[in-house]
Amino acid sequence: MAEPVVRVPDAKVALSTASVYPESTATAFEIAARLGYDGVEIMVWTDPVSQDIEALRRLSDYHQVPVLAIHAPCLLITQRVWSTDPWVKLQRARAAAERLGASTVVVHPPFRWQRQYARDFVTGIWRMAGETDVRFAVENMYPWRYRDREMLAYAPDWDVTKDDYRHFTVDLSHTATARTDAMGMIDRMGDRLGHVHLADGRGSAKDEHLVPGRGTQPCAELLERLAGTSFDGHVVIEVNTRRAMSSAEREADLAEALAFTRLHLAQSAARLGARPGVPLASPSAAAAEGSSSAAPTAASQEASQASSPASSQASSSAPSPGPPTGPSASRESRTPGRTPGSSGVRPS
């Protein structure tokens, strides 16, 4: 009797370049290639390489790692990156996505003190989304807390499901920090959920961005739901590895995050038969459809990770590697020990 076949869903698993901080954007490409990630999401911030489309193209070609998403420079530390005008930032993010072949631009809701930008934000995002095939996926945020005080720093709201956007990004570290029901938020997003930032958290006032499985968020439940639905976006590992004691420890964390993600996508695919087309906000329908499917088979794990760009809204400084240099896009032109867009020395 033939063994049932487990078809892993089409969702690609990408590495956010913020996940290797304080290492560089160039290092993120190298690690993503070595561990077997499907691509990267570029966090545009103070690293000059992250702002340079041609440098990013060389890195992508050299490592054969596609750029799947661009995270627009929305952090406090990136207020002057790509202009001080937030709409210019989004226009440049869209242009970068189009030139690099990325399908998604991730954007945060405005800060409350960006009053005119906040007033026009919802209609402006709709307008920009109508001008391109690139998705503008607006990301859920959280209230800022200090001791017993709470500050609502984002407008129109940190809970982006209170407004009408074409696409959403859900970030599970942010749901932890907001102390909100993550699956309830995902239900409200419905089939407009277009992008996932996978990380964990324990409900701290600090945005933790833990490796999935190390906190209290429903990371596995979310992945299993995505696998049984028509989700056609990307799952991006956006974790804080700043406290890693070595490059090897950082890489082990990122390998663990990738294995966790692919394992839970595959487990649900085995249980539900990986049948597309079930609406994202209908887990009961997905379960009903999967109830008559073959029994699950063992899914193989792939092992091919505080404050960082992924987890800090108020960091005031960050290391900036030198300007992008390096060989052209050809794999044949590689020089041992050098990485395009880096200073030339591969980290140990």
Image (cartoon, rainbow, N blue to C red):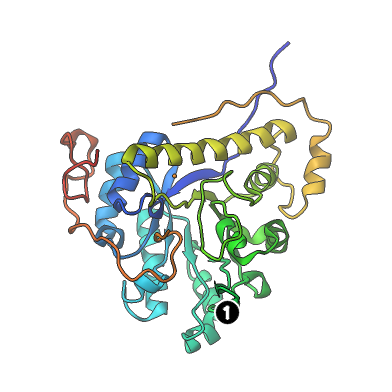
From the top left corner, tell me how far across and down residue 198 is, in percent: 54, 51
Residue placed farthest to the top in the image? 1
Crowding at mark 1 (Cα within 10 Å: few <14, some 14-19, many 20+): some
Give the residue at x 67% y 58%: 182
Element type at mark 1:
loop
Give the residue at x 65% y 75%: 163
The relative height of residue 65 versus residue 293 in the rendered view (above or below) is below
The relative height of residue 49 versus residue 128 in the rendered view (above or below) is above
The relative height of residue 316 versus residue 241 in the rendered view (above or below) is below
Give the residue at x 62% y 37%: 264
In this view of the protein, can residue 64 be seen by the observer? no
Task: Report which quarter residue 296 is drawn in.
Answer: top right
Looking at the rendered structure, the kind of residue marked 1 is Leu
Locate the N terminus and report the quarter of the image it occupies.
top right
- Which residue is denoted by mark 1 in the rendering? 152
In this view of the protein, can residue 205 be seen by the observer? yes
The answer to whether 32 appears left or right of 229 in the picture is left
| Residue placed most toward the observer, 185 or 131 | 185
From the top left corner, tell me how far across and down residue 332 is, in percent: 20, 33
The relative height of residue 138 versus residue 33 in the rendered view (above or below) is below
| Residue placed most toward the observer, 119 or 114 | 114
